[in-house]
Amino acid sequence: MPTFPFSEADPIRYPGPPPKASEVVVVGGGVIGVTTALFLAQRGIPVTLLEKGRVAAEQSSRNWGWVRKQGRDEGELPVAIEAGRLWRQLAEECGEDIGLVETGVTYLAETDKELAGFDDFMRLAAAHDLDTRLLDGSETAKLIPGMARKFAGAMTTPSDMRAEPWLAVPALARLAARKGATIVENCAVRTLDIAAGKVRGVWTEAGFIEASTVLVAAGAWSSLFLRKHGVSIPQLSVRSTVAATEAMPEVHPGAAADDHIAFRRRRDGGYTLAAGGGSQLYVGPDAFRHVVKYLPALRANPFGVRYSPAAPSGFPDGWTTPRDWTAETQTPFERMRVLNPAPERSKLQAVEKNFGALFPQLGKVRLEASWAGMIDAMPDVVPVVDRVEALPGLFVATGMSGHGFGIGPGFGRVVADLIQGNAVGHDMSRFRLSRFSDGSALKLGPAL
Ligand SMILES: Cc1cc2nc3c(=O)[nH]c(=O)nc-3n(C[C@H](O)[C@H](O)[C@H](O)COP(=O)(O)OP(=O)(O)OC[C@H]3O[C@@H](n4cnc5c(N)ncnc54)[C@H](O)[C@@H]3O)c2cc1C
């Protein structure tokens, strides 16, 4: 495992300077921005990706590394299926080991009621010809031997994969650069430049870049950036804590979760772990602004989120984070090059305890690293991937709601086609921006 997490202290690999003009500018060097830039570059479109900190230093390296179709929202599933194919293809093209292996994803059910809760996805899986299946208690014990608890059963998708995020996204960025994308790190986009009601370019901390098309793929910062330009998305971010064990004997090669623990075998022989019990929302001005939109999610899962009265200084929805700025002055984006929340101690204690309790034969669970990430959440748990009708030239792909890594290359390909004005091949109505303002009832997607 490399030194983790990525930080501002890491060397700048793409120092710039940025070009004076580019056909497309991508704001944000996470998996969405990187794969969009990759597909555009592959088609010969001049594209410049600007990252305020380091490529993949925020969510896109901090995630669990699950590449799953299982449990996806109906609208996301076709994109996730395509993403699986693209991951395989891109892993080949990268020519680097990104840890991509087909080891399956499994959701464990303690009770028959929980098991019955998988029925909806089983129907969807059958309609898409997935290899997802339900296991009874003894099949579950055979799939993951040595578990100290008995489960009523499980849902499993053997063709789902795992990958090492901190290797994969930087490798995809190198591939994008080889294909001709210009990448610049340590270069925050401060504002859009708008003329005659259309996007004309961006102002960055390194000056102006002329561009007729701009994609905002800024993860947890997207809503702050967009609001400045009159585009409101009800996006919030929640803290989620992760831990990595040192290398230990293999209990299961894939990824699995129940209500208490989520675990995933890593390439280096350790496990990446997270405790159940929900994420933490720092309540700031946006949380108040969007509370009504989040009521259905809160009603469906009242214990899914814990609240904290204030975000640390400089966080996207912090009370003192500026909401307005100019192109000439320092913005919240360059003040926080890498959003690096502290992991929650109680969660780290819980992962040691819960993983150890599930696999007592492993002895004491030793953690060699821990970190947290701010998940960019949407009230209906599915992203916004759309053009902004009110501002020609502006595209948004954000709010991946905790499951954007696995589906990343799928949305990257889709957004590249949206930008080029091509048919995208999937029904994108589920991800439309207008769903938050056109009076339609929000339909909740699955949380995991
Ligand atoms: C703990 C955790 C576990 C997860 N587990 C999984 C999983 O197992 N499987 C899965 O599929 N997904 C998972 N996810 C979700 C997944 O990591 C994210 O959905 C995905 O990485 C989002 O990618 P992104 O490109 O949209 O955003 P990010 O990766 O957050 O990238 C956005 C980038 O934009 C940059 N930026 C912001 N503003 C500006 C600006 N003004 N100028 C320039 N740059 C800017 C930021 O610095 C950042 O690097 C998890 C997430 C977390 C936090």
Image (spheres, rainbow, N blue to C red):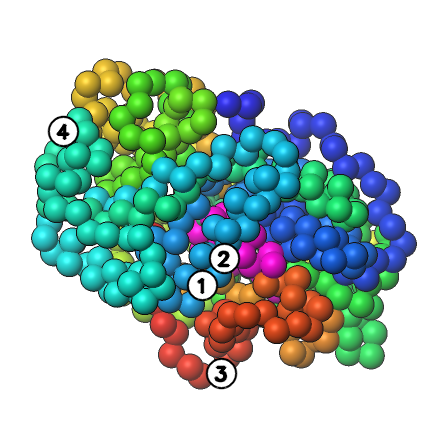
- Whichever of labels 2 and 3 marks the residue nearer the N terminus, that label is 2
Q: Nearer the viewer, mark 2 or mark 4?
A: 2
For label 2, the residue is 82
Q: Mark 2 belongs to which amino acid?
A: Glu
For the residues bearing labels 2 and 4, Cβ distance under 8 angstroms: no
Q: Nearer the viewer, mark 1 or mark 3?
A: 1
For label 1, the residue is 78
| Residue sitting at x 67%, y 28% | 10
Picture quadrant of residue 124 = bottom left
- Whichever of labels 1 and 3 marks the residue nearer the N terminus, that label is 1
Question: What residue span does the magenta drawing correspond to?
Answer: 396-413
For label 3, the residue is 438
Q: CA distance from mark 3 to mark 4?
A: 50 Å
Q: CA distance from mark 2 to mark 4?
A: 37 Å
Secondary structure category for the residue under label 3:
loop
Q: Is residue 110 visible?
A: no
